[in-house]
Image (cartoon, helix red, strand yellow):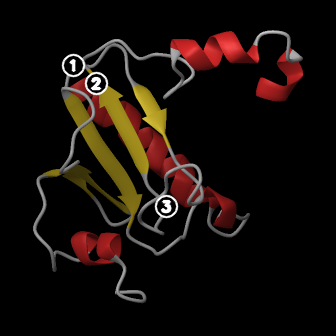
Amino acid sequence: MKNDCLFCAIAAGEIPSSKVYEDEICFAFYDIAPQAPVHFLVIPKEHIGSVAEISGENSSVVAHIFEVIARVARELGLESYRVVSNIGEQAGQSVHHLHFHVLSGRDMTWPPGWSIGQEESRRGTPAALYL
């Protein structure tokens, strides 16, 4: 386990989880605080802190994770789903280990977390600032 990383411990089987999928490269498990009827995470077994730490040396792990996401989504019968990775504290990353949330089973709003009041206050702001 790297630096007492929660997700390293889950991938190593040191902390119990509701496993969805596992192979030699990644581990998928249901979120303990689901934000949708279907909400699981896919993590690399190798410790990578976040998307910001992806490089040419480890990017094949990410490609494999996306193959796994597609496979698991098909196996679960998901036709529509969202994949999210938060990078950094302000974005909501609470565990410093690369992970992808897969959410399905409800309507997803865009942008996430944006309220109607905020939408009204941003009118007149150049659209390029929100891309």
Residue ID at (27%, 70%): 11
| Residue occupied by mark 1 | 77
Q: Is residue 95 above or below residue 47?
A: above
Cα separation between marks 1 and 2:
5 Å
| Residue occupied by mark 3 | 98
Q: Is residue 102 above or below residue 131?
A: below
- Residue 110 x, y percent position in the rendering: 54, 17
Label 2 environment density (alpha carbons within 10 Å; few <14, some 14–19, many ≥20): few
Is 40 situated left or right of 89 in this image?
left
- Residue 29 x, y percent position in the rendering: 22, 51
Foreground pick, 73 / 113: 113
- Residue 81 x, y percent position in the rendering: 38, 22
Is 30 situated left or right of 74 in this image?
left
Numbered tag placed on residue 74 in the rendering: 2
Quadrant containing the C terminus in the rendered view? top right
What amino acid is labelled 2 in the image? Arg
Quadrant containing the N terminus in the rendered view? bottom left
- Residue 113 x, y percent position in the rendering: 49, 28
